[in-house]
Amino acid sequence: GMGAKLLPLPWARLTYNRDMEAYQLDITEDELRSAPSFLADKDFDWGDRAQEEELHRHYGVPPYWGF
C-alpha cells in the first residue's frame, strides 16, 4: 500500500526552491522504480556504509565522505 516502501535520497540530489519553499528532486521515473528502498516499519541504517554507497551510486552522486 501507499507509504509501505520508503526511498532514502542523498542530499546532493535535492535542490531547495525558495519560491516554492520546498525541496525539488530531479530524478527519472526509471531511477525511482529501481531505487534502493526499505519497508516503512524498518529503519534505513545510515551507519552502514555499504548501503549508503549503493544509494549514492544509484543516484550518480559522490558520497559526502568521498570514496
Image: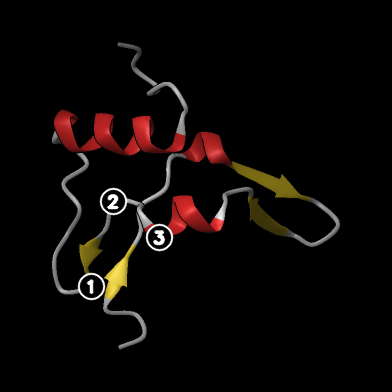
Q: Name the mark on residue 33.
A: 3
**Mark toward the viewer: 3 or 2:** 3
For badge 2, the amino acid type reads Pro
Q: CA distance from mark 1 to mark 3?
A: 17 Å
Q: Where residue 28 appears, x then y in whole percent?
A: 57, 52
Of labels 1 and 3, earlier in sequence is 3
Q: Which residue is mark 1?
A: 40
**Mark 3, secondary structure of its residue:** helix
**Mark 2, secondary structure of its residue:** loop
Q: Name the mark on residue 36.
A: 2
For badge 1, the amino acid type reads Ala
Instruction: Report whether 37 appears left or right of 20.
Output: left
Figure quadrant of the C terminus: top left
Q: Nearer the viewer, residue 43 or 53?
A: 53
Instruction: Report whether 61 appears left or right of 57.
Output: right
Q: Where residue 16 appears, x then y in whole percent?
A: 69, 47
Q: Where residue 22 appears, x then y in whole percent?
A: 69, 59
